[in-house]
Image: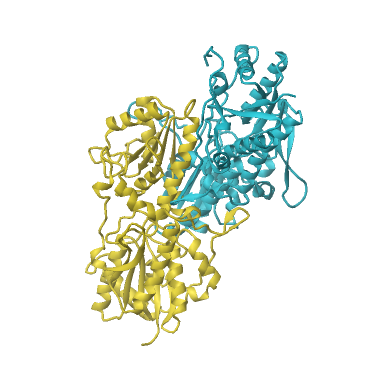
Chain colours: A cyan, B yellow
C-alpha cells in the first residue's frame, strides 16, 4: 500500500476546540509516518480544495501544531459553503477528485456540523462513482449540540461552560445591585433552533432562587403573560431575576421574538438581538430596571474557559480519525459515545454518514421543566459531565498565547482554476 | 484605648474583586483582635447603616471569609445611593453617627468610586463636628478606572483583562469566518465617560492587522466618515475588521450614539446598546456581514478570568485599611502607587479625601493614537501590568465555587427606624 496524503478541512461556525481536533489529527498522522503522507488542510474549508489552496502542515513545527489544542477559532479558515447535490453540480465533485488526485490525497476528513456530514457523504458516493479510492470520514463539531447519534458535539461543552459560568457570575453582580438599581438581567445566547446552550446555563443553579431564574428556549413558544408573571414573582421573592434567552425564541405565531419589524430613520431593518426585546418588555410591563448582555461570538470563542472534557474529546476525535482511516473505515462520522453507569465515561464510536447528514437533534421534552422556564434533573445529569474540568491556555503578560502557524500554501499542481 | 468596632460597606457598581478588598480587611482585622473589635458590614452599602442592617462578620467561618477573595459581585449587597450635602440633610449624617455609636463603631471604611469618597469625606467632617471619634478611610473601587491620584482602581484590571482576552478570542473566530460570512465584529464595553476599558482591549493587538482593529472611545467624538473608511480599509487589507466600542461614544453634537431616538410600535423608547447602532451603520453603508456582542455585566463580574495583579491589589487595600486605621490615619483614601523603574512594582499610599472626592480622571490625550482609533505605546505601557497574572477560583463539577456567607444580621440596637 503506497502512502497517501490527507486532506482535512474545517467547516461552518468555528468553536473553541475545533483546532484541538485538527491538532489530534495532525499529531497522530505524524506518528503514523510509515503509513501516511502529508496532512494538507483546506484554506477556508472545502473552498481550499476547489481553489487549490492547500496548507502544507509539514511546514509547521511540533510546537505550533501542539498549540492548536489550546487555540480557538478555525486556524486554517472555515467556510459557510454548502456543496450542491450530486446531480445538480457534478462538476464541483469532479473538481475535488481532480485536486485530490493531483495532491495524491487518499483520505478526506471534514470537520463540521450536519451540513458538512452531508458533504462528506456525497464526497464518498462521488469517489466511488468515479472509481477514485478515497477514505471519507466526518469529524463532528458544532456548538449547537444538534448532531444526531453522537452523545454530544465537540464545541458545545465549552460554550455550555461559558454560559453557566457567566450567568453565575453576572447573577452575583445583579444580586448585589438589586436593592437600589438593576433588578432584572437578561443574557442572550446562541441557539437558533435548539435550546441546548441556553439549557446549559441551568447548570449554574444551586438551589431554588439562585440564577438563572428563567430560561427561554426555542423549543417552547414564548408566552408573554406566563413569562412576566414568573419574572415578577422572582423579583418579589428573591429581590432580582436573571434570564437566559436563546436567540431562537419564537412567538406563538412562529416569528422570532428578535424580529420586531422595526426600521430606523433610513428605513433599514433594526438589527435584532432578542435580549433588548425582552428588556423592553420587562421595563414597559413591570417597570423594573434592567441590564442585558449578548454574548455572541464571545461564547463560542472562549477558549480561556473551555471545558477539559470538551477539549479532550475534540482532540481524541482527530486522533481517532487517523486510526479509523488506517483500519479502512470510510463513509462514517465519528461519534462520542457515553458509556453506561453512574460515573461519566466516554469513548469514540462511528456511525454511517447517511444516518447523520442533515439531521438536527432537538432537546427532548423530558429535559424541559413543566413550566417551560427551566431544565429537569435528567437534563442536568446529561449536561453536567460535558462542562467538567478546566484546561487553561498558557498566558504571557496577562494574555492567552494562541498558536500562530506559518500557513504555507502548497504549490498549485493544476493549471486550471475553478469558479466557486 | 478601648477596642472599637468597624463598619465597612460596598458602594456603587460592583466588580470582580471588591470582595477581595472585604476579605483583606476582615482577615487583617481578625489578626488584630487585640486592638479591633467586630467587623460589621452594611447590608446594601450605606443603607445598611441608616436602616440598622449590619451583618456581623464574626459569625462567618475563616473559610467562608477566605472565599471572598475569589468571589465576584458584592457579597453584602451594594447600593446606588448618594448621601446629600451636610447642610441639606444633616439628619442623615446624625443618624449614621447615632447608629455607629449604638454599635460602638470607631472605624468607617467605604469601598467605592468618586461619589463614595465624597461620602466618606462628608462623614469625616460630620463626625468631627459632632465630636464623635471616627476614623474614616475610603477604599477605592471602580471598573471605570477614573479615580484621581491612585495609579489605577481595583476592579479595572480584571475588566481590562476580560475585554482584551475576549477580543483576541472573538478576533480569531471572525478571521476564520470572514471569507464567506462575518467580516465585521463589534464588541460593546462599559465606559460612559472614560475610555479606559475600551482602551484595554488594545492590549490584545499583537501587530498591525491583528484585533482589535478599531477602538471607539468616549474621548473622541464619532466621525462617521473616518470610521467607515477605516473599517473598509481593514476588511480590504486583512479580510476582516474587529471593533471595540465604548458605551459612551458620542456624536459630534454630543449626543450618545446609542441614543437613536427610536420607538417601538407601542411608542416605547428603543433600548440602546451602541453595538447594534454601529452594526447597522456598517451594514447599510458598507454592506458587510456583521456580528455584535454586548458584554455588559459579564465583563465586570468575570472573576474566572480576573487579573492576579488586580486581585492582589484589591486584597492589599483591605488589609492596609486596618493598618492605616491603627496608625490613626483618617479622612484619607488609600491609593495604589506605581513605583518608578522599568519593572512594574506597586505599593499602597494615601491621599486626602477632599483631593479625590467627586473627581473623574479622563484618559490623557497621549494615550490615544493620532487617528483616534487606537492606543499609543505609552498607553500599553501603563495598562499592560494591570492585567498580568491569572488567579483562578476553585472549581467543582466544572463551575467556579463562589463563597456563600451566612450573613447574620446583628440585632437592632435603636428602637427608632429611619426613613431612607
What is the x, y in percent for residue B61? 55, 73
Asked whether, in this view, residue B397 is left or right of residue B346, the answer is right
Does B249 appear above or below B148?
A: above
Does B84 appear above or below B414?
A: above
Q: At 68% across and 50% down in the image, what residue appears?
A: A377
Tell me, yes or no, if residue B251 can be seen here.
yes
- Residues A350 and B247: in front is A350
- Residues A400 and B136: in front is A400
What is the x, y in percent for residue A323? 72, 35
Does A228 appear above or below A209?
A: above
Tell me, yes or no, if residue A143 can be seen here.
no
Q: Quadrant of residue B277?
A: top left
Placement of the C terminus of chain B among the 4 image quadrants: bottom left
What is the x, y in percent for residue B178? 47, 29
Q: At 67% across and 44% down in the image, what residue appears?
A: A367
- Residues B397 and B192: in front is B397
Q: Quadrant of residue A139?
A: top right
What is the x, y in percent for residue A387? 62, 48
Amino acid at each position: 500500500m503506497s502512502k497517501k496524503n490527507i486532506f482535512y478541512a474545517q467547516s461552518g461556525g468555528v468553536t473553541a476546540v475545533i483546532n484541538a481536533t485538527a491538532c489530534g489529527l495532525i499529531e497522530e498522522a505524524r506518528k503514523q509516518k510509515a503509513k501516511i503522507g502529508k496532512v494538507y488542510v483546506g484554506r477556508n474549508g472545502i473552498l481550499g480544495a476547489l481553489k487549490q489552496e492547500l496548507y502544507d502542515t509539514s511546514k509547521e513545527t511540533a510546537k505550533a501544531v501542539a498549540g492548536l489544542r489550546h487555540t480557538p477559532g478555525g486556524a486554517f479558515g472555515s467556510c459557510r459553503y454548502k456543496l450542491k447535490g450530486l446531480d445538480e453540480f457534478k462538476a464541483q465533485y469532479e473538481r475535488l477528485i481532480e485536486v485530490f488526485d493531483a495532491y495524491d490525497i487518499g483520505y478526506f476528513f471534514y470537520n463540521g456540523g450536519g451540513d458538512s456530514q452531508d458533504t462528506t457523504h456525497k464526497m464518498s458516493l462521488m469517489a466511488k462513482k468515479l472509481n477514485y479510492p478515497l477514505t471519507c470520514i466526518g469529524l463532528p463539531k458544532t456548538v449547537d449540540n444538534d448532531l444526531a447519534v453522537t452523545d454530544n458535539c465537540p464545541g458545545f461543552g465549552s460554550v455550555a461552560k461559558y454560559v453557566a459560568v457567566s450567568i453565575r457570575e453576572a447573577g452575583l453582580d445583579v444580586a448585589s445591585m438589586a436593592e437600589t438599581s438593576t433588578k432584572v438581567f437578561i443574557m442572550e445566547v446562541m441557539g437558533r433552533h435548539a435550546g441546548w446552550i441556553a439549557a446549559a446555563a441551568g447548570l449554574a443553579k444551586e438551589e431554588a432562587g439562585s440564577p438563572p431564574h428563567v430560561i427561554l428556549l426555542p423549543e417552547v413558544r414564548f408566552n408573554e403573560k406566563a413569562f412576566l408573571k414568573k419574572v415578577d414573582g422572582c423579583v418579589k421573592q428573591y429581590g432580582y431575576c436573571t434570564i437566559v434567552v436563546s436567540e431562537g425564541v419564537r412567538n406563538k405565531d412562529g416569528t422570532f421574538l428578535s424580529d420586531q419589524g422595526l426600521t430606523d430613520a433610513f428605513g433599514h431593518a433594526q438589527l435584532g438581538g432578542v435580549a433588548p426585546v425582552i428588556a423592553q418588555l420587562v421595563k414597559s410591563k413591570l417597570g423594573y430596571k434592567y441590564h442585558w448582555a449578548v454574548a455572541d461570538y464571545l461564547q463560542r470563542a472562549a477558549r480561556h474557559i473551555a471545558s477539559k472534557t470538551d477539549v479532550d474529546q475534540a482532540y481524541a476525535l482527530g486522533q481517532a480519525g487517523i486510526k479509523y482511516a488506517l483500519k479502512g473505515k470510510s463513509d462514517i462520522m465519528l461519534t462520542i459515545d457515553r458509556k453506561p453507569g453512574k460515573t461519566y465515561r466516554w469513548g469514540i464510536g462511528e456511525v454511517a454518514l447517511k444516518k447523520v447528514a442533515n439531521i438536527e437533534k432537538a432537546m427532548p421534552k423530558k429535559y424541559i421543566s413543566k413550566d417551560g422556564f427551566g431544565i429537569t434533573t435528567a437534563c442536568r445529569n446529561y449536561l453536567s459531565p460535558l462542562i467538567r474540568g478546566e484546561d487553561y491556555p498558557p498566558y504571557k503578560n496577562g494574555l492567552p498565547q494562541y498558536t500562530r502557524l506559518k500557513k504555507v500554501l502548497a504549490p498549485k499542481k493544476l493549471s486550471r482554476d475553478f469558479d466557486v
